[in-house]
Image: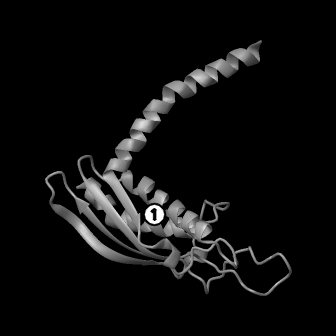
Amino acid sequence: MKTKHFFFAALFGLATVSPVLAEEAAAQNSKVKVELDNPVKFTDVRDAYMPSDKGQVANAEILRDYIAKKSAEYVPDGYTLNVTVTNIDMAGDFEPWGRAGADDVRIVKDIYPPRIDLSFKLVDSAGNVVKEGARELRDLNFMMKINIRTTDSMRYEKALIDDWISKDLKPVKAG
């Protein structure tokens, strides 16, 4: 009997929280627009040694969504951030040698650093460009840093994005 009450209480809680989360997501989405410039042509967003277009696009979209979510936290109300990702080269690579069946394992070594190229434009509510530029995000020491996302397969790329956001967008919010 208690399980039934708990189930309905949880269902009610989700029903009341979901519209709030949806509104928050919509507000963030209106502040940030992230475009992928031909993700199939990116240097390396592969999902396997012999990649599929669908897998490559899915990996690029994960990073696109991460950029949108994280940068929305730093974009002031009334402002709009437009980001165009022009290239991604994920950390590591799929090496062709090894044992059978291991060709779908991304090997991460310091000789394969993550790289992301993007351009951005931050516009205020009056339509004035507050900040814009093109960035080539690189971190040759990516394996030397402490990273709390130990189970995230895109932890190195997300750390690059976090660094870019803290450098380019954080001062705008504070000012």
Which of the two residues, 54 or 9, is positioned nearer the viewer here?
54
Who's the residue at 26% across and 59% down the image? 172
What residue lies at 59% left-to-right and 76% top-to-bottom?
91
Q: Which residue is mark 1?
A: 162
- Viewer-proximal residue among 30 and 140: 30
* Circle 1 Cα neighbour tier, 10 Å, few/some/many (<14 / 14–19 / ≥20): some
Above-or-below relation of 121 to 20: below
Dividing the picture into quadrants, the one containing residue 93 is bottom right
Give the color scheme: rainbow, by chain, secondary structure or one colour: one colour
Q: Nearer the viewer, residue 23 or 71?
A: 23
Residue in view at x 61 percent, y 76 percent: 143
The vertical placement of 5 against 37, above or below, is: above
* Quarter of the image with the C terminus in it: bottom left
Residue 5 screen position, x and y as percent: 69, 15
- Residue appearing at x 38%, y 43% in the figure: 26
Considering every residue shown, the one lying at the far front of the view is 53
Q: Is residue 108 left or right of residue 57?
A: right
Question: Residue 115: x, y in percent?
Answer: 49, 78
* Whether residue 146 can be seen here: no
* Residue 126 spot, x, y in % from top left: 13, 53
Name the side, left or right, on which 21 lies relative to 75: right
Q: How many marks?
A: 1
Residue farthest along the right direction in this orientation: 100
Q: Residue furthest top?
A: 1
Pick the residue in front: 148 or 165. 165
Where residue 174 appears, as percent x and y from the top left, is 27, 54
Q: Does dot 1 land on a helix, a strand or a loop? A: helix
- Can residue 36 be seen here? The reply is yes
- Quadrant of the rendering where the N terminus is positioned: top right
Q: What residue type is disc 1 on?
A: Asp
Displayed quadrant of residue 98:
bottom right
